[in-house]
Amino acid sequence: KRQGTQANWWIYYGLCNIGRRPTFAYKSEGQSIEAHLFDFKGNIYGKKIEIQFLKRLRPEIKFPHPASLAKQIVSDRIKALRIITDYH
């Protein structure tokens, strides 16, 4: 069985953050789970999905502004795609 995130019984790879969203969140907010699925088009809010992990890319970081986070996410995506390629 391949690992990844399943939505509508299909496997989608992507990035996932489990944490407090320090770039945007206030200290009083709890943890959240956010998944960005590569090549997925659709709305799965409120649906149950299963997430499986291949590798941890980095710890959660508080960026000085959203543009810095966006730049890091581009780098994270490139790393994730390499990991996925090596996995197959």
Image (cartoon, rainbow, N blue to C red):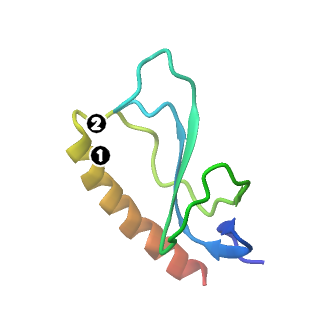
How many C-alpha atoms fall within 10 Å of the one at disc 1: few (<14), some, or many (≥20)? some
Report helix, strand or loop for mark 1: helix
Q: In this rendered view, identify the residue nearer to me: 4 or 45.
A: 45
Within the image, what quadrant is residue 25 found in?
top left
Q: Quadrant of the N terminus?
A: bottom right
Q: Which residue type does callout 2 highlight?
A: Phe
Q: In this rendered view, identify the residue nearer to me: 41 or 54.
A: 41
Relative placement, left or right, of 68 versus 62 is left
Q: Is residue 52 above or below residue 60?
A: below
Q: Is residue 70 above or below residue 39?
A: above
How many C-alpha atoms fall within 10 Å of the one at disc 2: few (<14), some, or many (≥20)? some
Residue 44 is situated, as x and y percent measured from the top left of the image, at 61, 58
Q: Earlier in the sequence, mark 2 or mark 1?
A: 2
Q: Is residue 75 above or below residue 17?
A: below
Q: Which residue is mark 1?
A: 69
Relative placement, left or right, of 54 versus 36 is right
Residue 33 is situated, as x and y percent measured from the top left of the image, at 58, 43
Report helix, strand or loop for mark 2: loop
Q: Is residue 4 above or below residue 56?
A: below
**Residue located 21% across and 46% down the image:** 67
Q: Quadrant of the C terminus?
A: bottom right
Q: Which residue type does callout 1 highlight?
A: Leu
Residue 76 is situated, as x and y percent measured from the top left of the image, at 38, 59
Tell me whether circle 2 and circle 1 mark residues in contact (CB < 8 Å).
yes
Residue 79 is situated, as x and y percent measured from the top left of the image, at 41, 66
Give the residue furthest to the bottom.
88
Q: Which residue is mark 2?
A: 63
Q: Exactly how many numbered labels are in the figure?
A: 2
Q: State the separation of the CA atoms marked 2 and 1.
A: 6 Å
